[in-house]
Image: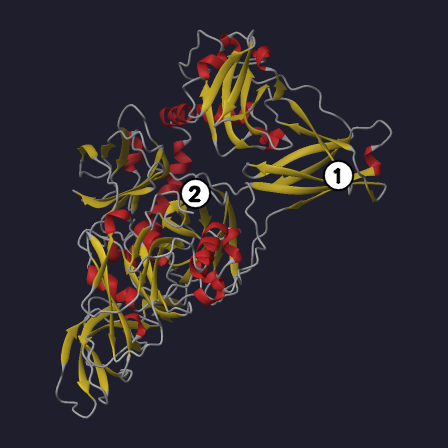
Amino acid sequence: MSKKIIFLVIFGLAGYSKAQDKAEQALSKFGQNYPQEKIHLFFNKNSYTAGENLWFKSFVFDGYNSSSISTTLFVELYDSNKTLIDKKLIPLLNGEGSGSILLPEKLKEDIYYVRAYTAWMSNFSEDFQSVRPIAVYNALSPEKLVKDTVSPWTASVYPESGTFIEGINTKFAVRMQSKGMTPSDWSGYVIETDKPDTPLVTFKGFDQNTGLFNLTPKLGKKYQVVIQDKEGKKQNIDLPEAMHSGINLQVVSNSDAVNYTLKANNLSQGSSYYRVIGSINSQLVYKARINKISNETSYSIPADKLVNGILQLTVFDDKENVILQRLCFVQPKLLKIEKPSIQSLSLNHAPREKNSFDIAKDPDHTNYTVAVIDSETESSEEDQSLLSTLWLTGDITSRIIKPAQYFTKNNNADALDALLISEKWKRFDWTTIISDKFTPIKYKPESYISYKGKVNVQGKPAPNVDLNLIFDTSNNGTKLYQVKTDNDGMFTLNNLVFEGSMKFSYQLNSEQKTPAESSVFFQPNYTFIPYRNNLPVNGFKLVPRLKDETPPLEAVRAATTKNMQKIINERITDIEEVKLKGQKKNSTKKLNEELSSPLFKSADEQIFDFVNTNNQASTNILQWLQGRVAGLQIQFQGGSYTASLRGSKIGIYLDEMQVDADQVNSISVSDIAMVKVIKGYFAGGFGGGNGAIAIYTRRGGSSGSVTDPKKPTKLKQITLNGYDKEEPFNNLIYTDESLKTIPGDTRSVLYWNPYLEVQPKEPTSVEFFNNDDAKNYRVIIIGFDKNNETPLYYNEIVQ
């Protein structure tokens, strides 16, 4: 169910019963039990060169809201033969995640595919997973990529709502398709088949996808549509024969309302009434009962009561058979988008000089995704933007060329409407869900990473035994945690959030069992699921590369930048100023790495650093936290403190040992190194701790790390794999003049930050340095307002 309010509009003629019919019941069940996730991938570039890193930011939505269903994203890289090249496991926090994929040096030039999905999405059609083609260039390959302008195009014609009836003026959508590139400049006309030289209607295509025309048919006449591109290529398409009787659903969506009309001709009394249901994202938003069809009566659905998105209008007869369907977009010219305010823009176009701008303070956002790209370089958002994924392609499975164009400032609402006339809603089928035939759920969403464990003693399962897990955190000494097996010798480690690998030792908590007699086996509760679909069409083809042929400019620039970056990476370690700046920036992160064991790390945690910042507390540390963490309540009752987060009691830990609140009262704030508030489940809770206040003391060093005690001996070790580490993106900073002497700065991406932290009380600053020739810059800022579930989007060229 959508978290954003969508009002239900009920229109009744002769009284609409408030009781739900089968269609409404089925829709309600589907919407509540089968929420639909979709994924947008924002790449740092639109094309790459073999040997480069591909960076991406992922946004996962539940309908039109940021998703809280899945906490793990599976990302895979395939070649054009559907051979798996690489795979990544990415944590999601509030529906967002980021990562990187290294494209091997030996990749041949070709189109490759990045697939992204969640475990929950794997219960449904693979058509709704994100599979994005990317061009990878390699000047050493014997073949090169070129746009496929040779493959023939085809056109299909779709009457509005699927019916073509004598005497009813009907809107037709023309849809272009091709394995290669469809023409951007094309036109058409309609003829009677026996009068081929007399056009009845002429029209021009809107774009590479669609065109639109109207026609009022006469019974017994045969019609054709003739499509022609600027090269003179033609295609003749037969229209369906006009029916003597029937109903046509006609829809017009504008800024104040979605208006629809049912028009009929020679209609028999087959149905005593009709029901009209409107749904957005599997949620009922409109229903009406129409007892008598009048061609002159128009019905209105107030658009201000709805959200931007695809509205599905379905007409049922009195036996609940679907007779008409139509998709349209709500308020295509009034998109509800927040746009950040750019302030203090300072540009210096000289090579390698600093530029900056501020993003105005906004309390409704905690972070932004920000990219600054040389305006001569194409962004991945130019073809498929976050807005087009959210509102269109996330729910439409057919190929759409450059869907981002339908959600720009000067978008063509008629072109988008024509596109939706040619589409059908495939998230569910009315007949199937009314028959109560729902998809069986095989993959349930896990809360981050979990592992199943099994304890054997002398080769047999060990039921109801205590197992000690001993973590050596190197900087924070040895930590011991205890789990208990069930009747089958099984146990589970839930909600693990860590990168790379986690090593620990284990032993049974029994003096009678020696390490040699016991063994522990682990199996992850997650799995990468093979891709069964065919890879999508990409619009490119490979042709032989001529000898001494010049590679594409973008590939040359990427190779030059790669060589420059290598030199800088070698030199930058000697630049103390840059090194110190990096240490200062990551000091809190470093402190967290030193003090926290893997079981006390969470993707949803808030850290207060008392070592590297000026955090000071003159009161009890629990009282100090009050008001600094959203949803945290500290109460003093019966002479003792209690802590709750969002209404649920949470544990208090001192150096990762659970204690009563009273035990932290006597701790001097000067002895505290760090306080961490973990929201939600975490592995250290063992048994489902719903959040924690973790207090770390200063012992054994300025950072608060504990002196490492003597390690246990004769213990077995095991390693678990966590999330994949993201390669740091080097936002090149020319703070040292010697770097400016290194030749060949041809970077196309001048700044990339998938998680730019917002400053709540002041503007958020962005600084970037020029390459050698950039004059204008494309600035992309993406965010999502979690309060009113509205996308924040900025994609403009600044100069």
Instruction: State the residue lying farthest toward the bottom.
Output: 194
Dividing the picture into quarters, in which one does residue 262 lie? bottom left
Which of pointers 2 and 1 indicates the residue nearer the eye?
A: 1
* Residue 50 pos. (x, y %): 42, 55
Find disc 2 in the rendering and name its residue: 95
Distance from Cα at disc 2 to Cα at disc 1? 33 Å
Q: Which colour scheme is used?
A: secondary structure
Image: 693 above or below 668: below
Is any atom of residue 21 visible in this view? yes
Q: Residue 486 carries which label?
A: 1
Q: Is mark 2 on a helix, strand or loop?
A: loop
Label 1 secondary element: loop
Q: Give the farthest residue toward the front.
A: 14
Q: How crowded is mark 2: few (under 14 residues within 10 Å), some or many (20 or more)?
A: many
x and y, in percent, of residue 791 in the image: 31, 43
User: Looking at the image, can residue 46 be seen?
Assistant: no
How crowded pointer 1 is (Cα within 10 Å; few <14, some 14-19, many 20+) is rated as some
Q: Which of 487 and 587 is in front in this view?
A: 487
- Which residue is depicted at the point 16% across and 42% down? 799
Q: Report the front residue among 320 and 480.
A: 320
- Taking the spot 55% from the left edge, 21% from the top edge, the residue there is 694
Tell me which corner region of the image, top left, top right, bottom left or bottom right, holds residue 412.
Answer: bottom left
- Type of amino acid under label 2: Gly
Residue 298 left/right relative to 547: left
